[in-house]
């Protein structure tokens, strides 16, 4: 069964990835380093970050409100 994370924890983790993205080659590599430090799976963090970028119109895709 998937682990549930509170919205505040998800938002904090995504913010951390986005704030430190310039230190890594990609979102994926940032999530692989930052995720374990926060006790979050890298793939979960990558998905949350990607969705946050879509919601902010930084990359194309279906926004959360349209999903």
Image: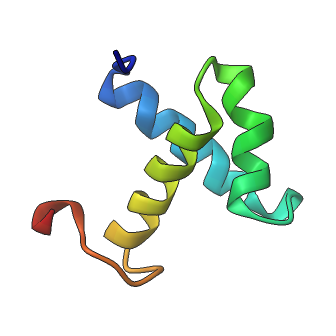
The quadrant of the image that shows the C terminus is bottom left
What residue sits 37% from the left and 28% below the top? 8
Left or right side of 34 for 54: left
Q: Position of residue 22 (x, y in %)?
A: 81, 64
Left or right side of 49 for 31: right
Color encoding of the figure? rainbow
Q: Position of residue 66 (x, y in %)?
A: 12, 68
The residue closer to the viewer here, 2 or 65, is: 2
The quadrant of the image that shows the N terminus is top left
Above or below, 44 relative to 6: below
Above or below, 47 relative to 61: above
Query: Which image quarter: residue 24?
Result: bottom right
What residue sits 55% from the left and 36% below the top? 13
Left or right side of 2 for 14: right
Q: Where is residue 26 in the image (x, y as percent from the top left)?
A: 76, 64
Q: Position of residue 42 (x, y in %)?
A: 64, 37
What residue sits 69% from the left and 44% below the top? 31
Above or below, 12 relative to 5: below
Query: How many numbered badges does the structure rendering display?
Result: 0
Query: Which image quarter: residue 55?
Result: bottom left
What residue sits 44% from the left and 26% below the top? 9
The residue closer to the viewer here, 13 or 66, is: 66
């Amino acid at each position: 069964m998937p682990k549930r994370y509170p919205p505040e924890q998800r938002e904090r983790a995504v913010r951390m990835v986005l704030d430190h993205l310039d230190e890594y080659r990609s979102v994926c590599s940032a999530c692989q380093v930052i995720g374990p430090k926060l006790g979050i799976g890298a793939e979960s963090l990558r998905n949350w970050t990607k969705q946050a970028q879509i919601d902010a119109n930084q990359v194309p895709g279906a926004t959360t409100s349209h999903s």
